[in-house]
Amino acid sequence: MTCIAALTLFSSIGYAAPTEVTISGQARFTSTAPLEKIVGTAPVQGQFSIDFEAPKVVSGKFTVPVKGMKTGNETRDEHLRGEEWLNAEKCESIVFEAKSGEVTKFQSAKESDKGITSIKLLVKGAITINCITKPLEANVIIKRKGNITKIGSSSIEVKLADFNVKGKEGLVGKKVGETIKINLNLKGK
């Protein structure tokens, strides 16, 4: 079925076409270990698609270039990009592909006294870190006013061992947490 035929079919049976949103911003990642707490940031770029009138399905792709990750310590940043960690030469990006979304709360712009659409979702998809792909679920909040869209998230937890991120022997669990917490702050049109 062509794209035009699909849009015609959806509009004729009362479905609005999903809105395509290009988004960018930052991810904040936190590693808490017995000897040290590390907080860093990373740029995020992506696109997603959702029907803001009747959100049932969300899809999209978000990318973080490993070389763009910063922890406030250049030596640590170089280690982070190395083969024993995120292997930036071989695995250039961390990628999250959203495949579906389960709406947990919805308020349309028409229902809001400020004209803001607010959608809380459990987004389901897959994340690729260190060239290894695993399923991931994330609770996100999407807010839209006019054509401006913001995405925030509760903490998304990622276990380093699931992605074969080992670091130098003995560091994970002592100086680097076994689980990394990620929060998103994204904006787009």
Image (cartoon, helix red, strand yellow):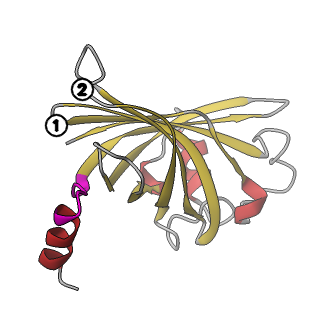
Q: Which residues are magenta?
A: 12-20
Question: 136 or 9: nearer the eye?
Answer: 9
Residue beneath the point at 85% across and 39% down: 174
Q: Is residue 183 visible in this depiction of the protein?
A: yes
Give the image quarter of residue 152. top left
Asked whether 123 falls inside the magenta stretch, the response is no
Which residue is the extreme one toward the bottom?
1
Which residue is the extreme one toward the top?
113
Question: 62 or 140: nearer the eye?
Answer: 140
Q: Is residue 167 visible in this depiction of the protein?
A: no
Looking at the rendered structure, which numbered label has been put on residue 48?
none
C-alpha separation, residue under disc 2 versus residue under disc 1: 15 Å
Q: Is residue 66 left or right of residue 16?
A: right
Locate the N terminus and report the quarter of the image it occupies.
Answer: bottom left
Locate the C terminus and report the quarter of the image it occupies.
Answer: top left
User: For the residue labelled by badge 1, is the local secondary structure a helix, a strand or a loop?
Assistant: loop
Q: Is residue 140 left or right of residue 133?
A: left
Q: Which residue is mark 2?
A: 110
| Residue 107 rendering spot, x and y as whole percentages | 38, 29
Residue beneath the point at 16% across and 37% down: 147
Residue beneath the point at 81% across and 47% down: 171
| Residue 19 rendering spot, x and y as whole percentages | 23, 52
User: For the residue labelled by badge 2, is the local secondary structure a helix, a strand or a loop?
Assistant: loop
Residue beneath the point at 24% across and 50% down: 22
Asked whether 15 falls inside the magenta stretch, the response is yes
Q: Type of residue at label 2?
A: Lys
